[in-house]
Image (cartoon, rainbow, N blue to C red):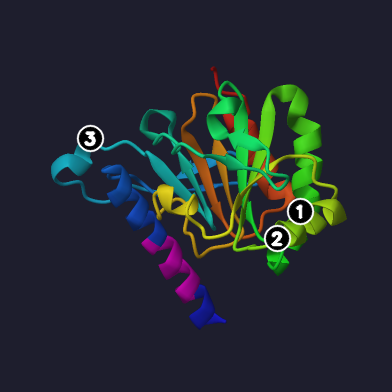
Amino acid sequence: MRTAALAGAALVAAVAGCVFAALGTVAALGTVAADGSRAEAAAGPATGPATEARAAVRTAAEAVVIDPADRPAAPALAGGDLDGKPVRLDGFRGHVVVLNVWGSWCGPCRAEADDLQRIARQHRDQGVRFLGINTRDPDRAAARSFVRAHGLGFPSLHDPTGELLLRFPPALLNPQAIPSTLVIDRRGRIAVSIGGAITEDELNPLLARVTEEAS
């Protein structure tokens, strides 16, 4: 158990380090509580540019939350959905977007799907929109069966080769980590990155923080 805990801590530290490098920012680590509140880590000895660095990125478990001033723009995404209809991420500009990467073959994706649909329905009136990226499903039919089974009401870009995933900074969206979820703010910037399956109780406070921001 101790070995697993240490390995998990090392993974979080490694991800945080990659994020800092990707954003060109030295940041302090902290935690995101269940209610979305944040606790800063005590700062260590400061040297060089780190003395003026702000807490741009804060890590909690497998979630990375980015301060508004330091958010990278989400890449352009466009393509056909599971029915072949055109979908563009920038068509959702002005809304908070939950971007979920999933595959019909993925057990954890099945575990989180019902929660995602419930959140999508509950937060629609608050200007939240959901968009999926269906990956590694060569056959759209399998993906459509997944959508029907879970009653998903939001569109998904069909990305069988994972090409769309490679457009994101790997520290924020690892193409090998399925499922993954991003929260994109109203200005089209990545605000939250979550690796692994997410539950309603875990996503709601993170989503609330972004939706409550001024546009």
Q: Residues within 10 Å of mark 2 (few under 14, many from 20)?
A: many
Q: Nearer the viewer, residue 38 or 107?
A: 107
- Which labelled disc corresponds to residue 156? none
Q: Are marks 1 and 3 in contact (CB under 8 Å)?
A: no
The outermost residue toward the top is 215
Q: Nearer the viewer, residue 59 or 189?
A: 189
Residue beneath label 1, please? 113
Nearer to us: label 1 or label 3: 1
Residue beneath label 2, please? 109
Residue beneath label 3, please? 52
Which secondary structure is most common in the magenta stretch? helix
Q: Nearer the viewer, residue 8 or 176?
A: 176
Quadrant of the snapshot with the N terminus:
bottom right
Quadrant of the snapshot with the C terminus:
top right
Which structural element holds mark 1? helix
Identify the magenta region: 6-14
Q: Position of residue 34 (x, y in %)?
A: 65, 46
Query: What's the residue at 65%, 32% (across, down)?
Result: 208
Q: Earlier in the sequence, mark 2 or mark 3?
A: 3
Q: Amino acid at mark 1?
A: Ala
Position of 92 compared to 174: left or right? right
Estimate the spatial distance between the alpha carbons at disc 1 and disc 3, rounded to whole Å: 41 Å
Q: Are marks 2 and 3 in contact (CB under 8 Å)?
A: no
Q: Amino acid at mark 2?
A: Cys
Residue 9 lies in magenta, yes or no? Answer: yes
